[in-house]
Image (cartoon, rainbow, N blue to C red):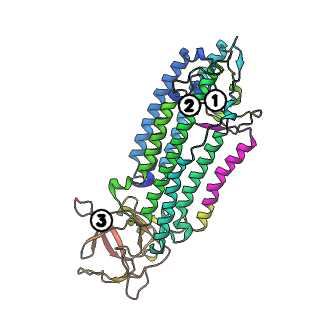
Amino acid sequence: MTTASLSGEVIVSFYAVASCLAPAITRPTVPFGVRVPPERASAPVIRQQRRAYYGRTAIIGACCIALVILLQDRGSWWLSRIILLAEILADLGCFLIARNQIASVKQAERWYAGHRQVVATDTSWRTDPPRFPVRWLIPALTVIAVTVLVGALRYPHLPARVTAGGHLVPKSVVSVFAIVAAQLYVTAMWTGIMLIVYRSRPDIEAADAAGSTRRYRRFLAAFTRAVLTLLALVDLTLLLGALRHWQVYRLSGIGSALPVLPFAVGLLVLAVVAFRVGQGGSRLTGGGRGGPGPVAGVDRDDDRFWKAGLIYVNRDDPAILIGARFGVGWTFNLANPMAWLVIAGIVATPAGLAALAATVGILPGSGQVEAGRNGLDGLVKAVKEYGAAALPAVVDPAPPRNGESGGGELGHQVQAQVFGIQPKLVGQAGDHLALDPGAVVLDVSEQGRLGDDQAAGGQEAPVPAGVEALDGRGQRVVQLAQDGT
């Protein structure tokens, strides 16, 4: 189990639950992105499509979760991302089916006939705007500061090659502190988005303008605190991952899940808060009807501005962000040029970081080979693919020394080049080495010495010839054979 595969399981599972429960936290007057009058919020077609959506998405989510668990140790890290993409597309199809059914009945029965359509607003949002909870940013900033401090203390003691992006790269300030850049990006991006949200207009219901405004204030405060808590826990997950790469700690088995735990807790907190408050505070009670009171009319039917019920395009609306119509959150007004500038900044920043990472070899494909995601089998596979001529001997991460001969032909000087999680030499008999299988990252950029005065890949270079079980303790045996035999 790797951190990447485990994080994939967490994300797929979280999305499955969030997508299935989205209708329950959506405003009752916009079921599946269709604006309806309040008295139609419990229409038979809406109840029917909600039940059908629950069933379809529950089956899709269960299948995706089972699939990502079964394939957690197979394939590459992006396998769970492909499953997530398929899950998103399938759930989107379920959403569109329900939306089209409700929209068809709404149009056929003319639900808005005879209604006075109005747009309600509350001037107190400008005269007494909500205050952004800056102090909730302190945990995230503290975690980032700790990451920088620990990284600075560990930097002089790190080896010449460090693990970054899942493989080995030369040690540098960029490769070691790339995790800090990721922390800063995530924290700055979501903080900036929430600041824009605080300057956006609230979703006010015409039937209860004053009460819905108060509920929205409570919703915004609770949801922002949950988002900032998630940011701190995401930064903590990145810190724990960095500490492992910086050789501060090493965990195996179930302990390898430690870095993902804060991220999972943060998602859980966000989900609980979202389900409790609902979109715009729709699930909150006690708003009251003080103040101006209800408006004589219903909320305007603005479906024409919502493409597929999810994408908002309105040139006459100066808002950059507006409350989403499905689930909890906000979406961009794609008719506003400023929204595109924000989107460009969100996309350009990680693209620039990726380009910088590529220049220092952090991204995959920079000449290193990662072997051993499946234990020693990956080591043998790497040896067979690349040959002994380019592969340093892999026994133990120690300085060059004379190997301990056990009666065979292994008494050669060995230059060990093992990084990451090393296999442990647990026994030797003749021409066999018994190793504890584990994830091994091999650097193939240099040739190691397999003999006293002989270049790698010579006639006497020992190469693994096969793998066989040693006993029931999870150990395996690499059998050495002479090159060219």
Q: Secondary structure at mark 1?
A: loop
- Tell me if mark 2 has few (under 14), some (14-19) or many (20+) residues whose alpha carbon lies within 10 angstroms of its own: many
For the C terminus, which image quadrant? bottom left
- Tell me if mark 3 has few (under 14), some (14-19) or many (20+) residues whose alpha carbon lies within 10 angstroms of its own: some
- Tell me if mark 1 has few (under 14), some (14-19) or many (20+) residues whose alpha carbon lies within 10 angstroms of its own: many
Amino acid at pointer 1: Asp
In the rendered image of this protein, does residue 388 appear above or below residue 329? below
318 is within the stretch colored magenta: no
Amino acid at pointer 2: Gln
How far apart are the two marked residues, 3 and 2, measured between alpha carbons? 52 Å
Residue 241 lies, in percent from the top left, at: 45, 58
For the point 62% across and 16% down, the residue is: 105
- Horizontal side of 87 relative to 207 (left or right) equals left
Residue carrying label 3: 436
Amino acid at pointer 3: Asp
Q: Nearer the viewer, residue 53 or 129?
A: 129
